[in-house]
Amino acid sequence: MKLIGVVDTTFARYDMGGAAVSELRSAGTGFRVLRRTVPGIKDLPVAAKKLITEERCDIVIALGMPGGKEIDRMCAHEASTGLIRAQLDTNTHIIEVFVHEDEAPDEKDLAALADRRSRAHALNAYRMLFRPKDLERLAGTGQRQGYADAGRLGE
Amino acid sequence: MKLIGVVDTTFARYDMGGAAVSELRSAGTGFRVLRRTVPGIKDLPVAAKKLITEERCDIVIALGMPGGKEIDRMCAHEASTGLIRAQLDTNTHIIEVFVHEDEAPDEKDLAALADRRSRAHALNAYRMLFRPKDLERLAGTGQRQGYADAGRLGE
Amino acid sequence: MKLIGVVDTTFARYDMGGAAVSELRSAGTGFRVLRRTVPGIKDLPVAAKKLITEERCDIVIALGMPGGKEIDRMCAHEASTGLIRAQLDTNTHIIEVFVHEDEAPDEKDLAALADRRSRAHALNAYRMLFRPKDLERLAGTGQRQGYADAGRLGE
Amino acid sequence: MKLIGVVDTTFARYDMGGAAVSELRSAGTGFRVLRRTVPGIKDLPVAAKKLITEERCDIVIALGMPGGKEIDRMCAHEASTGLIRAQLDTNTHIIEVFVHEDEAPDEKDLAALADRRSRAHALNAYRMLFRPKDLERLAGTGQRQGYADAGRLGE
Amino acid sequence: MKLIGVVDTTFARYDMGGAAVSELRSAGTGFRVLRRTVPGIKDLPVAAKKLITEERCDIVIALGMPGGKEIDRMCAHEASTGLIRAQLDTNTHIIEVFVHEDEAPDEKDLAALADRRSRAHALNAYRMLFRPKDLERLAGTGQRQGYADAGRLGE
């Protein structure tokens, strides 16, 4: 039985963690989910690391929704840097799922994007854990999460 | 008995540490507070780490007020990066509370914002330590600290 | 028998990992190749580190195709920083091969660039492992990967 | 007997280390000073770390004068990031004293600023080592180093 | 007998490593030089670290010539950050010698600058290893590498 950690924020304006858990449930079996919530994206790195080192998660999905201002982009950069460092510290993948508040023209589209991206990355996490060969078959095919796939160049 | 560290700066123009301690006192019991003050925000990461490793704090609140110039934003970025690293080094949460000097139109509003944000994050620290389920119930609800909550998308 | 790791992404729009493996095969013998695929470039650092620490690779080639927007450049920066850190953590070279989506005027040229750069860096990885003196002879000669070499200054 | 490290650069155009040592001498007793000089600010992090780990300094003052161009600001950013990391590696404070070459309108004012800031931060280092309560009393009072203090908001 | 590492790149358009070695030879005796060449500046950090940890170098000179575009500046930033980290990991100085391709108006001047800066920093490395007091005497005197010294402020 594998353990998948899901950590999201109270700052996000959509239940991204819930969407990820829902997608995981329909992706397959053989795992349990452990969920945590922190205030903001800068709190994600250590929360994800604790899920790995203290709770023995085999992979973690870290979800957040940075604001649309310059300073928010810097916060997202700091959080991403920390998430990569947490992975290197633990030799364990943490799938980052960030949706920037200015990525969609209105709230409805933003919610839909957050839902799709959270689900697409939850599926990626599932594949990394249970079906790595599925990812290898998709190498270089322009996969996107939340938008339509870009596809191979020239196709 | 838990131990909560509070570290702030002489550079800040508002007693953010005092506001955080005051809020903690009214949030509940079961903890003691250990307070430190350093010159500026770049001194916060190691001060917070020492509160954890040398003083055995279970969580730390790190408060500062970066100036409003480009170079101050870079200082804040460096401090934030260090605070995330200190968390990963110790597997312990450090709640960052930064109020940028140019976030409010005048000194009075800035002081009020600094007070509200310090208190809101002190409450977050309390919840992380004693009531993590409260945070999970707020996942994806657009919580803000110092401003009105943004709420869920489309609501 | 040496072990060369090759890790690429499903996000890329060209089979950069395949091009690298193909070039390695024609460069020489004395090694086996281990291939992995992850969703995006931010997943490369820990994937490369795992190839080194868990699979005993002697060198890793990490390939990706960041998008052309400002936020994609930041992702590439975070991935690069992580790849350098993974190298320092393991005392092992990881050859980064990034092709930015806006580096070429159209899809056909971009595919050709991705192919050439992947192959040129695969050759570099081979040289680092088997023929380091070849690199020393090329010191300061303005080698480029994917474009024509720049050559020595003034020549 | 405490040990205070002072490290500065040959790049700086003012004897900032000398000013810091002079101020330390008049601040009090109970310590010895160990001084080092490196070429530029990027050499400061490891020099400061060596003063702590190899020479047993209890605190270090790291002084430099970055140039006024964009690339110099990036150098300062890299040096600052390294100084924070050196602190976290050693659980020891390193007080950074940087004066940017474009912070003053002419050379005379820049020299005066460099002198004042070096002295003010030397005093901070002394306080951190011997009189931490003095800093706590100054929490949130808008202290500045080299310029007039900003004071509390609204006062 | 001390050991000085020299690592440069095939990307650079001038034999900076050769210039550094030549200058070291005329600076004095009491050391051997170990030289390595890597493809680009992002490969320098781990190469320098390996020279220290695997080859027992007492100091390393890392030389490179970043291109003149925005993305090249980011590469240089990533390399510099890695070089500082490699120093902190090993408690050993690594002297970074970067010449940006857009620092000189034409190829001839750029080659001359690369030569002078490589030599000036090679001399710095020699001083750090054998004559640290020489550097202390130059503290705050506005030394430059490759350009005329800036001198003390007001002189």
Image (tube, coloured by chain):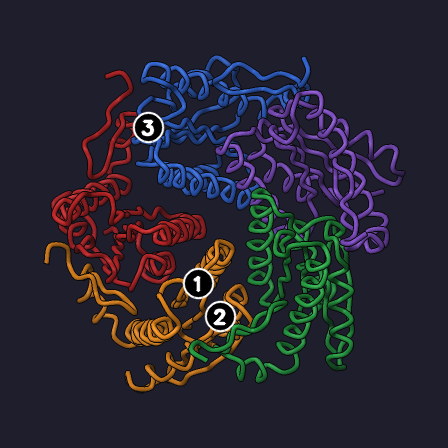
Chain colours: A blue, B red, C purple, D orange, E green
Please give left or right for residue C21 compared with residue E41 in the image. right
Same chain check for tags 1 and 3: no
Q: Which residue is mark 1?
A: D87
Foreground: A93 or E96?
E96
Q: Nearer the viewer, mark 1 or mark 2?
A: 2
In the image, what residue occupies the spot 68% across and 15% down? A154
| Image mark for residue A12 | 3
Q: Chain of mark 3?
A: A
Foreground: A41 or D25?
D25
Mark 1: few, some, or many residues within 10 Å (few <14, many ≥20)?
many
Q: Chain of mark 1?
A: D
Residue C34 sits in quarter: top right
Task: Provide residue B89's location: percent of width, then percent of height.
Answer: 45, 52
Mark 3: few, some, or many residues within 10 Å (few <14, many ≥20)?
many
Label 1 SS:
helix
Please give left or right for residue A65 compared with residue A130 in the image. left
Mark 2: few, some, or many residues within 10 Å (few <14, many ≥20)?
many
Q: Which residue is mark 2?
A: D48
Q: Chain of mark 2?
A: D
In the image, what residue occupies the spot 25% across and 62% down? B37
Q: Is residue B24 visible?
A: no
